[in-house]
Image (cartoon, rainbow, N blue to C red):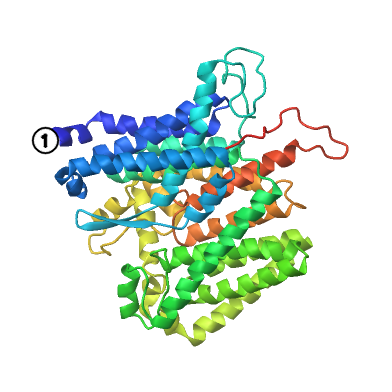
């Protein structure tokens, strides 16, 4: 009873707000000390909130039955985390590279009769990278030696870490930080506070810390190429698994897709992603990056590598049967074409019309393959009903919505005869409108506009910035057709890299234009 009272009381809600404020501060802080303290508070408070939520649930039965083993396991985990943090401190380039490796992996954890697919490897990388930055920053601040923790430049004032060591963040990053706090505030009246808490702890808070780390990396050409090579290699490995699933007719990781494959005429592969649409998204975004290489790197060897990789990934993407991923890939390629050949709008429109006509012809001749013989709801995998239900929820509470994380709860309550497994509307704007109302939707639209301005402004002529911008637009379209915008770490990674490249580009002098006084420092992660 005491635990229920605590969970129903103000402390967890205040804790979620505190964690969100700390995450926002980690993004926006301009001094090393404040940034380090904010990161430390965020990565410590988040697991505390999660443990408070599940401590007396069946998910931790094994911990309660074997407390000594649990303590030993926790100590071993902390030791390994400290070792990884030390390694990252010595080799800062490991943070972005390990991030690219860990982005795709979700570990199925069985507890309490259920299974949760968590981004455990990515959480470990974020925590280790944060610690590798926090410890020396706080140590330098405490020593008061008059030197910046990471730029190693003398400060004019003795209060180390209190002098701004990085420029003011872009509007997109400010809005992103504000949205994290807004989501926590709207969790106060949510009909599913636990869902909102888990979204903050599992997604927004750790990903905000990740963005803060990636934003201050010195993204030189060598590091960018290295991260692209790792991403492409991972995609090829995942595609090999997908081809194996198609040939064997069985899924490597069991999920709801396995049951769906038994019911439908078609077979969808999902590799290590538990969801063919998320797998298709990963392949599509990687392909956009590889098309960038194909368009801008004129070396014969790189052209052949790009063509081979694209052909291999495209072949596997077909077996995902993810229409949203195909649309995302088409948009990404259209953006690249517009940048590369200064294409006119009419040319892009004609190209998109050709793609649509070709796709419509395939669908018309093979409707059963795409589920079009099951009605509108069946053709969209149940998304049509979810979207219309989300619009209905928005109409009921248009201003502030039903509260963060409440879509699943309210949809089941309003439509009890609907599908049992409901997570969101499979359309991010509709989900935000239903949960957060006009207030959240306004923040979301402002965030998108500012993010696109950040990534697209003055990007022409810079292949790396163009590739990031095209990939972000492809991801954005996919979220309109499926799900997971800020819940996908890829969004934060693209904004972090894109923001760093944009800042470095604006700091470089141009012909006839004096350089800005405020220059992004070369900060180690």
**Where does the image place residue 486, in percent across and percent down from the top left?**
47, 48
Q: Is residue 329 above or below residue 100?
A: below
**Where does the image place residue 238, in percent across and percent down from the top left?**
48, 67
Q: Which residue is disc 1 drawn over?
A: 1
Residue 450 is left or right of residue 410, and the answer is right
Q: Is residue 499 above or below residue 270?
A: above
Residue 494 is left or right of residue 116, and the answer is right
Q: Is residue 56 visible?
A: no
Front-lying residue, 141 or 268? 141
Front-lying residue, 519 or 451? 519
Place residue 401 in its image quadrant. top left
Residue 69 is left or right of residue 102, and the answer is left
Q: Number of callouts in the render?
A: 1
Q: Is residue 361 above or below residue 30?
A: below
The residue at 59%/16% (across/down) is 145
The residue positioned farthest toward the bottom in the image shown: 365
**Where does the image place residue 489, in percent across and percent down from the top left?**
48, 50
Q: Is residue 379 above or below residue 173?
A: below
- Where does the N terminus fall, quadrant-wise? top left
- Where does the C terminus fall, quadrant-wise? top right
Q: Is residue 184 visible?
A: yes
């Amino acid at each position: 009873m005491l635990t229920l009272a605590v969970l129903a009381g103000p402390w967890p809600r205040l804790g979620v707000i505190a964690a969100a404020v700390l995450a926002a501060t980690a993004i926006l802080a301009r001094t090393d000390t404040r940034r380090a303290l904010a990161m430390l508070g965020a990565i410590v408070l988040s697991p505390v909130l999660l443990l408070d939520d599940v401590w007396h649930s069946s998910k931790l039965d094994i911990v309660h039955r074997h407390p000594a083993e649990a303590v030993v396991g926790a100590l071993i985990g902390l030791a390994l985390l400290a070792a990884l943090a030390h390694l990252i401190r010595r080799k800062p380039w490991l943070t972005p590279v390990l991030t690219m490796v860990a982005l795709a992996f979700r570990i199925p954890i069985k507890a309490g009769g259920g299974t949760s697919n968590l981004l455990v490897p990515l959480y470990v990388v974020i925590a280790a990278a944060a610690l590798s930055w926090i410890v020396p920053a706080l140590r330098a601040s405490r020593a008061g030696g008059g030197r910046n923790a990471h730029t190693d430049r003398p400060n004019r004032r003795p209060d180390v870490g209190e002098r701004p060591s990085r420029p003011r963040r872009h509007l997109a990053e400010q809005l992103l930080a504000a949205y994290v706090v807004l989501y926590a505030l709207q969790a106060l009246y949510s009909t599913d506070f636990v869902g909102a808490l888990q979204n903050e702890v599992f997604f927004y808070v750790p990903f905000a810390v990740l963005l803060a780390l990636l934003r201050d990396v010195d993204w030189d050409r060598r590091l960018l190429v290295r991260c692209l090579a790792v991403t492409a290699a991972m995609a090829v490995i995942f595609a090999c698994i997908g081809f194996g699933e198609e040939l064997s007719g069985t899924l490597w990781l069991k999920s709801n897709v396995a049951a769906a494959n038994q019911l439908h005429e078609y077979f969808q592969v999902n590799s290590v992603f538990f969801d063919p649409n998320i797998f298709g998204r990963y392949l599509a975004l990687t392909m956009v990056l590889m098309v960038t290489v194909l368009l801008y790197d004129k070396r014969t060897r790189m052209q052949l590598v790009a063509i081979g990789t694209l052909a291999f990934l495209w072949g596997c993407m077909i077996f995902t049967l993810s229409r949203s991923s195909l649309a995302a890939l088409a948009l990404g390629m259209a953006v690249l074409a517009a940048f590369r050949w200064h294409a006119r709008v009419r040319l892009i429109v004609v190209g998109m019309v050709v793609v649509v006509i070709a796709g419509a012809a395939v669908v018309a001749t093979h409707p059963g393959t795409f589920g079009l013989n099951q009605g509108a709801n069946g053709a969209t995998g149940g998304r049509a009903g979810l979207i219309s239900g989300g619009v209905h929820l928005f109409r009921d509470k248009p201003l502030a919505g039903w509260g963060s994380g409440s879509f699943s709860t309210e949809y089941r309550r309003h439509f009890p005869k609907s599908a049992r497994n409901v997570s969101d509307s499979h359309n991010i704007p509709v989900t935000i409108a239903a949960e957060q109302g006009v207030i959240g939707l306004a923040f979301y639209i402002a965030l998108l506009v500012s993010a696109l301005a950040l990534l697209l402004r003055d990007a022409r002529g810079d292949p790396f910035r163009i590739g990031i911008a095209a990939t972000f637009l492809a991801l954005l379209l996919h979220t309109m057709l499926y799900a997971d915008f800020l819940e996908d770490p890829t969004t934060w990674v693209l904004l972090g890299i894109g923001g760093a490249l944009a800042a470095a580009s604006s700091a470089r002098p141009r012909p006839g234009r004096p350089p800005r006084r405020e220059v992004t420092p070369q900060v180690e992660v």
